[in-house]
Amino acid sequence: MLTKCPSPTATGAQTRRNVLIVGEVGVGKSSLINLITGQQHANTSNGARGCTLQSQEYTITLGSVQLALHDTAGLHEAVGRMKMDAYLDAVHQAYTLISKLESSGGINLLLFCMKGGRISMTMQQTYNLFVEVLCNYKVPVVIVATHLEGYDCMEEWWSENEKLISEYGLNSIGHACITATPGYRNMFMDKYEQSREMIRELLLDYSNRPSWKEEKANWVKRMMLHIHHWLPARRANRLDGSGLKKKLIKRCGFSVEDAEVVARRIEQCRGTTDSESSSWFTNEKFGVASESNNYVSFKY
Ligand SMILES: Nc1nc2c(ncn2[C@@H]2O[C@H](COP(=O)(O)OP(=O)(O)OP(=O)(O)O)[C@@H](O)[C@H]2O)c(=O)[nH]1
Ligand SMILES: [Mg+2]
């Protein structure tokens, strides 16, 4: 059974597991959701989208387990090139995603999607954004390599690339080599079905650890500190303290309370900024890590 979820609590926070699906533009994240659910609910795209942290949630019941799959839009970081409007959109989307995850129990598993082809710097940036910045290395990662229908044995791709993947720092506790398309006239249907079985098993195996979440203001702050460097310095410096809280409320959908706490914490970080820096946050790359040490760190 699959539903497009209108609200994070609609399916009951106690029993569900949150799975975040991330990766670069067009690698097959939405196709992966359709593969897992067996339905065409997530819209696939031609990959021609900009930089966004937008997400859409789908829930599926596998056996007795309820999984909330969070399909994120593909992302290529626009370091130093982003317009202010797009930056504020990204902050809004990050806040929405974090609020949703926080109020529904935290994250159980992250699926990092990549095209089974060349490994790139942008892959690494996307990995860092989600695994390091959003999840603070506290959430288990499974790599899902797509577009492998050309291989007789799709797993071969892993043997060929395992070393390189690790050299790029793309670490994981598990992996799946799949195709996320049945192909023209279902020409890859056997491999597609095989992929579905593999990925469903993997989801059940790896999503059963305790979920992780962080105090919301700190969580949002860490994301904001990171995405701040997507703005060019001249735009970044325009976002001074007095206007920030107002912008967070009016433009980014923050509650007044959250905006106050986040703006205050960001102000504190600003106090630690190198005076020669042209940007806010050079000294503190990702903010203060969570105080909560009850979670395992996945430093691999
Ligand atoms: N050949 C092949 N095509 C695939 C595979 N997975 C996805 N595609 C195709 O790649 C295109 C992009 O797939 P999506 O699922 O929309 O990718 P996405 O990661 O959700 O894209 P964004 O949401 O834009 O980031 C679509 O045309 C898919 O049919 C795969 O494993 N093999
Ligand atoms: Mg998509």
Image (tube, rainbow, N blue to C red):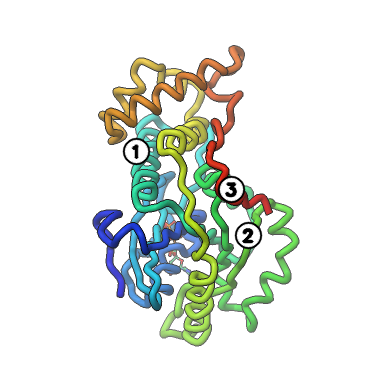
* 3D distance between C-alphas at marks 3 and 1: 23 Å
Query: Is the residue indicated by label 3 positioned so its CB lies within 8 Å of ligand 1?
Result: no
What percent of the width, then of the height, locates residue 53?
41, 46
What percent of the width, then of the height, locates residue 282?
59, 24
- The residue shown at (53%, 77%) is 198
Quadrant in which ligand 1 is drawn: bottom left
What percent of the width, then of the height, locates residue 300?
68, 54
Residue to which mark 3 is pinned: 137
- The residue shown at (37%, 64%) is 15
Residue to which mark 2 is pinned: 172
Residue 84, quarter of the rendered image = top left
- The residue shown at (56%, 49%) is 295
Q: Looking at the image, is mark 1 or mark 2 nearer the viewer?
A: 2
Callout 1 amino acid? His
Q: Which mark is residue 92?
A: 1
Callout 3 amino acid? Tyr
Pointer 1 or 2: first along the chain: 1
